[in-house]
Image (spheres, rainbow, N blue to C red):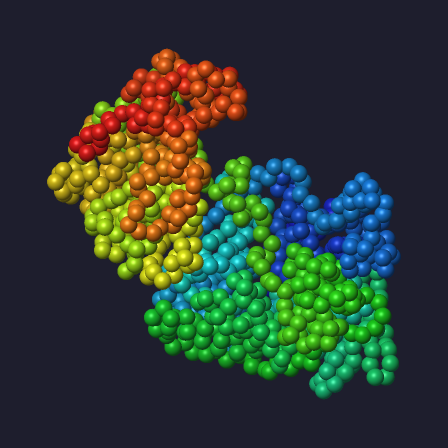
Amino acid sequence: MRIAGKGLLDRSKSVSFSFDGTRYAGLEGDTLASALLANDVRLMARSFKYHRPRGVLTAGSEEPNALMTVGSGGSQEPNVRATVQEVFNGLDARSQNRWPSLQFDPMAINDLAAPFLGAGFYYKTFMWPRAFWEKVYEPIIRKAAGLGALSGEPNADIYDKAYAFCDLLVIGAGPTGLMAALVAGRAGADVILADEDSRMGGRLLAETYEIDGKPGHVWADEVLSELKSMDNVRLMSRTAIVGAFDNSTYGALERVLHHTGDRPKGGALETFWRIVAKRSVLATGALERPVAFRNNDRPGIMTAGAVRAYLNRWGVSAGQRVAIFGNTNDVHRTARDLLAAGVHVSAVVDSRHDAPMTDDYRVYRGAQVCNSSGRKGLESITIRSASGETKVQADVLAMTGGWNPSVHLTCHMNGRPTWQRDIAAFVPTPGSVPGMHVAGSCNGTFSTAGCLRDGAAAATAALGELDQSAPDVAQPHAEDLPYDIAPIWAVPGKGRAWLDFQNDVTVKDVKQAAVENFRSVEHMKRYTTQGMATDQGKNSNVAALAVLADATGRGISETGTTTFRPPFNPVAIAAFGAGGAGKGFAPERFTTSHKATVERKAPMIEAGLWYRPSYFSKAGETTWQESCNREVGYVRNAVGVADVSTLGKIDIQGPDAAAFLDFVYCNMFSTLKVNRVRYGLMLREDGYVMDDGTTARLGENHYVMTTTTAGAGEVMKHLEFVAQALRPDLDVTFTSVTEQWAQFAVAGPKARGLLNEILSEPLTDEDWPFMACGDVKVLGVDGRLFRISFSGEHAYEIAVPARYGDSLFRKLVQRAEELGGGPYGMEALNVLRIEKGFITHSEIHGRITAYDIGMGRMVSAKKDCMGKTMTQRPGLEEPGREVLVGLKPVEAEGQILAGAHLYKKGDEPVRTNDQGYVTSVCHSPTMGHALGLGFLADGRDRHGEIVKLVDGLRGVETLCEVVDPVFFDRDGGRVRG
């Protein structure tokens, strides 16, 4: 019910929503939970396993009970926490995990079968008859399992992704986070303040304490107003930081449109952020834990902090007769707030024997609540004290077992929290997340004044690490009461006392796990499913650990904790994969020229996860072959431009860089001169070819390695393995810079003329011979130039920082077209390289040695290298091996197909007569017929021989002449000219 004069909502702004088909009225700013409580709706859900009636337990994102389905059709979203979902006009919410209705659910019969459905029952039952498992048991269990469900229809909602960078990320906007953001903001640091709630202020919105003589929420609004006025501060409400990852990166989920019924065209429902912060302050507060006692799960039994939050923030009393049970001074704070609002307090049960007494309400000192009654809502509680048991009428029980600091984010990088006995809770272990400062309640400081001090100190420390000075900010005056707790985890007695409300795990289940020798906390977790629901046991984990510790005769610190993993809050898969709907599971990588390429209507193909143009068609061309032939002509006769940014680029530096390259390449690189490039061949440990590419020496101890597009990731892993496992003695560092540089091939007889139009210094053969490299100025921008060629023509590759890539590509293409050339795609690139006999991973496919591709002499005899010893195994250089050859059809119109097999001219095409296979093919407009590369037994000794190509799958048979793999310009005059 609503309480007059309480809450922070505007009561003139009413909204209409429905729950299970019934219309209700709420206020703007209400959550679904607060609005339902205001309408005296206490039954909101059914439990997972036993289908017991459940009501709301908390007031935040940790809610385990009040999970609902919102929306319909493709936009239907299950398992929405009523404590997070804001109400709006037209909101349609439905309870779940019940049939046919929430009030009448026949599956509640499971509650009567509870003795047979305890922890691990599925490991011990359904064993016989064996055939029944697949046909009977499993279908029934699957039908009964789960909470909410998707509609099965396509989801038309839009999900977005975004990136942000800052000096300081403040996680949580309670008193600690606000103070930290204020100090850092006034210091001029680039600050992001993120909070999962719709309104910032944290517990200041839920309590009645004052700061500097004014209500806490007023102080919070004033600070937020100042922060909002700062250009260096970004406020991100409705944004939960859900994960802490390597390299100071944090994942964040922003709920953009969940609070409104409007779906503007193109508007994103959610945005998943990747935030890179130089430093962070964790100010996520603490989560209140319930106390386990018999039947402690009835609708109306809530945490005390939630009762105060609904009263002070939303102006809602959860009931008319409220009892309070706990072991801290929060029980008395709750009683005072309720009495001040005119709500009847039927009993205060304080388990501490030295609890304070008062005449304002009945206090049961040193007592415990041991049972409750009422089926679909709480009706009474049973209090056990030294004088016996007493039943007290109550429709709400506010319980508190203390507070658990929200340590979860500090554990996402394998950190483990530390047990702090005086607060009976785990706190973060310092240094668990590099660059993170933990402050306030999430670090075990529970007073308002202490949180304010912690926030300022954390921000000051973070600023100091960033070489920034913190301003003098006056410490606000606020309550600074000590935190007094006498731990109580579970009240002894018969019956089921609930720990994990969402997975229906009881104290008995945890004890049974210990009896059956599942003593490890991780084993207990999996045996009982404790903490494995969508809330990850935020309310229940510590109490379950305490019960396990008691059952196994160990201390809580010795028992340890389970592993907290991201995400902290549930995240839709669609948000993680924002932008990927209908595109499969592989990530998409786009070059800087992608937009300009798509504008020219070039069809895109995937190459090593990158999207590259297949060809650029022109008006009048009806087939891709026509476009390809034209583009090959550009390069052979004028000038062509191709984006080659996708080739892997690895920056290698250090005193031992040359020695490192000598080890990973089979040929020498220590003898390479500065400002020169050399082709290199890389072997695996087993001696087979792994990758090839060029490496440029930019300085005495500075190289840039180029890899194939498809092999970039594997080469990077290979280098890491060599540096860490095989040659840790070498002082060398390497970094992938593939995405930092946009690189374009400019190839053809007019390539030099084109580049001279955009370079500050003209190119000459004397200064820029073949395989030269160096720094250049490109239209005033610092860049790099490499005189290398993958086409066999006079060519260069020009590189600029990626932010200039789009502009440079457009300018290069424009000038190329003025010279009678233009852009060329992958089809033309493939033709050009086959004409020159250049290899790709079609040839070096994992079963090929340097000898097989005619590069055996590249394996230097002057040094050792990765894989060298294995290349000397018998059989790897002996006659009869399949080696690289060129193929051309005897008849000009003959077909050569990749994947076809080769046989002697007169042999039957069967496996025992197989002589080799074809790896790459094209139609060469330069030569006027098809060309192919392949591997043929003793191929280098069979040039001029006629062999039979057979593709049994496609029914093609062609006579081919075996030739040198270099078809065009064998002496290389064009590339060096």
Which residue is drawn at the image coordinates 43% and 69% (left, top)? 182
User: Image quadrant of residue 207?
Assistant: bottom right
Q: Quadrant of the C terminus?
A: top left
Residue 91 percent across, percent down from the top left: 65, 47
Judge whether 538 appears above or below 324 on screen.
Answer: above
Q: Quadrant of residue 547?
A: bottom right
Q: Position of residue 699 (x, y in %)?
A: 23, 54
Task: Please give left or right for residue 41 compared with residue 604 in the image.
Answer: right
Residue 435, x across and y down, in percent: 44, 67
Picture coordinates of residue 40, whole percent (x, y): 75, 59
> In the image, is residue 58 above or below residue 847?
below
Relative to the observer, which residue lies in front, 658 or 810? 658
Inspect this view and state whether residue 618 appears. no
For the N terminus, which image quadrant?
bottom right
Q: Is residue 293 left or right of residue 793?
A: right
Q: Is residue 209 left or right of residue 960?
A: right
Q: Camera-side residue: 959 or 645?
A: 959
544 with respect to 883 (left or right) = right
Residue at (57% x, 47% y) in the render: 573
